[in-house]
Image: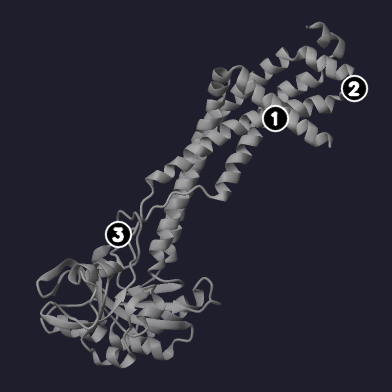
Amino acid sequence: MLFFKLFFESFRFAVNALKENILRTVLSLLGVTIGIFAIIAIFTLVDALNNGIQNSLSAFGDKVMYVGKWPFAFNEPNYPWWKYYRRPSPDVKEFKFIQDNAKWVKHIAIFEDKRGNTIQYKNNSFEDGKIVGCSYEYNKITSMPIDRGRYFTKSEMTAGVQNTIIGYDVAKQLFPRGDALGKTIKSKGQKFKVIGIFEKQGESLLSTPSNDEIILIPYNSLVKMYTSKGRNISPVLIAKGYKQDEDMGEMHAELRGLIRRHRGLRPKEEDNFALNKTDAIADFINGITGSLKIAGGVIGMFSILVGGFSIANIMFVSVKERTSQIGIQKALGAKNYFILLQFLCESMFLSFFGGVGGLILVSCLSIFSTETFIISLNIQNLIIGMGISGLVGIISGLAPAVSAARMDPVEAMRAS
């Protein structure tokens, strides 16, 4: 009961402090407001960035490894591309060898994509489309949900039937009336029957080509399309592991051993292929966003430090103005801890007011959200913001509260 009385009384004093000199109090709390805004805004923006990137990476699949010539590289100034360029690409024989012998690979597919293609239907055309040729289990590895129609059958994949599943933007451009299924489109002089349309994916924060712009065809169809014209293809293998292989260590070791064996590499010869995890992209991004959070926290703490001194100043003024009142409270039996807690709670409430202002400003950032970058103040960041505000209030009000609690009641009443 005493706690609630103290709580509401402190809240009333904090509100009165705001009312008595609004300009002084608001200016004093501005440091806390700016500090909380800086810290929580950075946290919120980083969370939005992470969510956008995770959504982009989800298209690559979970627990997925890519096998090809080129290793993933991030900010490597001396990337030896000439060395990797000479490496052999995976082929169908290698794909089937792994498919027949791997124990830690749940699904595996071979695919190749060709960009910058014009796709046509009668007088309508879609420029800069991406043709992807893949084997049967490709859809079990990557995230490519179908909105209308169906996926390829195994026999269609094996025979290289001229069927296709098209992206949302391709369908919208070529078939404005939405009657794409069963129609025949053309690209590179080849005709394909539309059997499905992918769900709309939207833009990617990683600037990777969207599934909205692709036409998916059987791998054998793509091979015929390009090799018949004397063009080379450089396919990639994509493998999905089992849940129990959490870090994909078993699958990585098995794939490496099988590929070396298939290519006849001697024990001392280095790998002439790359095994790439999509986790590497996420880890790289997390390193950057982690640094951004630290930088934002440091910048915000300087503003909060200024705000803390301002709150301490308000509380010292409040103690001086209420000296006689403190003396009367003590004369009537108020304990030192009661006076201490009263001023600490008041300081905390004042800091809360400043923190709420900062959080309101952060929530206003949502107006800058885009389809791929959704800014939203979540509960975790809200709690962090209020927690920092409360902590600043307690620390800032500690010295004034201690000075009020130690006052001699007789001397305090004489101060009036």
Mark 3 or 2, nearer chain start:
3
> Disc 3 vs disc 2: which is toward the camera?
2
Residue visible at 34% across and 54% down in the picture = 75
In-image side of 42 versus 202 (left or right):
right
Mark 1 or 2, nearer chain start:
1
Q: CA distance from mark 3 to mark 2?
A: 77 Å
Amino acid under disc 1: Phe
Contact between labelled residues 2 and 1, with CB atoms less than 8 Å apart = no
Residue 407 appears in the picture as rendered: no
Q: Quadrant of residue 342?
A: top right
Q: Which residue is mark 3?
A: 79
In-image side of 297 versus 263 (left or right):
right
Contact between labelled residues 1 and 3, with CB atoms less than 8 Å apart = no
Amino acid under disc 3: Tyr
The picture places residue 386, in percent across and down from the top left corner, at 61, 40
Q: Which residue is mark 1?
A: 11
Q: Foreground: 326 or 400?
A: 326
The residue furthest front is 177
Q: Residues within 10 Å of mark 3 (few under 14, many from 20)?
A: few
Secondary structure beneath label 1: helix
The picture places residue 45, in percent across and down from the top left corner, at 44, 47
The picture places residue 39, in percent across and down from the top left corner, at 51, 39
Q: Which residue is mark 2?
A: 333
